[in-house]
Amino acid sequence: SILSGIALPEETVRRGDVPDDGVGLVTGLLAIGPEEQQWLDRTAAEQADQEGLFPLTSFGDVVVVATAHGFDAWVETAAPRALGHHVYRLRVDPERLDPWFLAACLRERSNARRAGTHASNTSRVDVRRLHALRLPLEEQQAYGQVHRKLVEMEKALAELGGVGRELSDGLSALLATGRLAYR
């Protein structure tokens, strides 16, 4: 099943670190660059989900950010989270479709270009026009395992990049203040 997130009223959205009694909010800006974390009150979010006002994710859902500049797809591992505007939740039957395989197929960049639409100043991706290979479940699961390892590598490289930036900044500061010896 496919459910779309919505633009949530600004007064319901909190900013900062997500507390234990909060639910993170996934927005279309997430993949564009770093932004302040946004979240909702967990009780209110769960009630809104039950009433069908907006969807929350569950572990194993495939989440798709459907903006052309921030396009991405991944398997949800931090559920529950609320979905903002231009973000979709795909809930698959794991007996028929491997979510990691589906996310790997959907996030391929040329897929986003083929499914792209243009309306006024925004470019969006029509989630229903995205393509995925049709393979037997056993093959999907094998591809899905490889994709899961690639995602883990991607996260490790991002963390390493952050550590590298901190190291470079620290060394630059020492150099700029004359506290770094060089030869």
Image: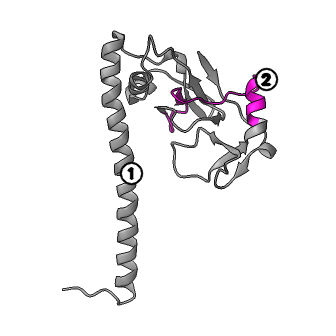
What residue is at 47 percent from the left and 16 percent from the top? 94
| Residue 32 within the magenta-colored segment of the rendering | no
Q: Where is residue 118? Give x, y as percent.
A: 56, 26
What residue is at 48 percent from the left and 21 percent from the top? 115
> What distance separates the C-alpha of mark 1 from that of mark 2?
38 Å
Report the magenta residues as a range: 45-72
Which quarter of the figure has residue 133?
top left
Report the residue marked by disc 2. Answer: 51
Q: Secondary structure at mark 1?
A: helix
Which one is nearer the viewer's eye here, 85 or 20? 20
Image quarter where the N terminus lies is: top right
The secondary structure that dominates the magenta segment is: loop
Give the mark, 1 or 2, whose residue is nearer the N terminus: 2
Which one is nearer the viewer's eye here, 21 or 127? 21
Report the residue marked by disc 1. Answer: 158
Image quarter where the C terminus lies is: bottom left
Horizontal side of residue 19 vs 146, given as left or right? right
Structural crowding at the residue carrying mark 1, measured as other residues with C-alpha within 10 Å and reported as few (<14), some (14–19) or many (≥20): few
| Residue 58 within the magenta-colored segment of the rendering | yes
* Mark 1 vs mark 2: in front: 2
Q: Secondary structure at mark 2?
A: loop
Q: Where is residue 129? Give x, y as percent.
A: 50, 16
Which quarter of the figure has residue 54?
top right
Horizontal side of residue 146 vs 52, given as left or right? left
| Picture layout, residue 160 above or below residue 175 | above
Identity, as a three-letter code, of the amino acid under mark 1 = Ala
Structural crowding at the residue carrying mark 2, measured as other residues with C-alpha within 10 Å and reported as few (<14), some (14–19) or many (≥20): few
Identity, as a three-letter code, of the amino acid under mark 2 = Glu
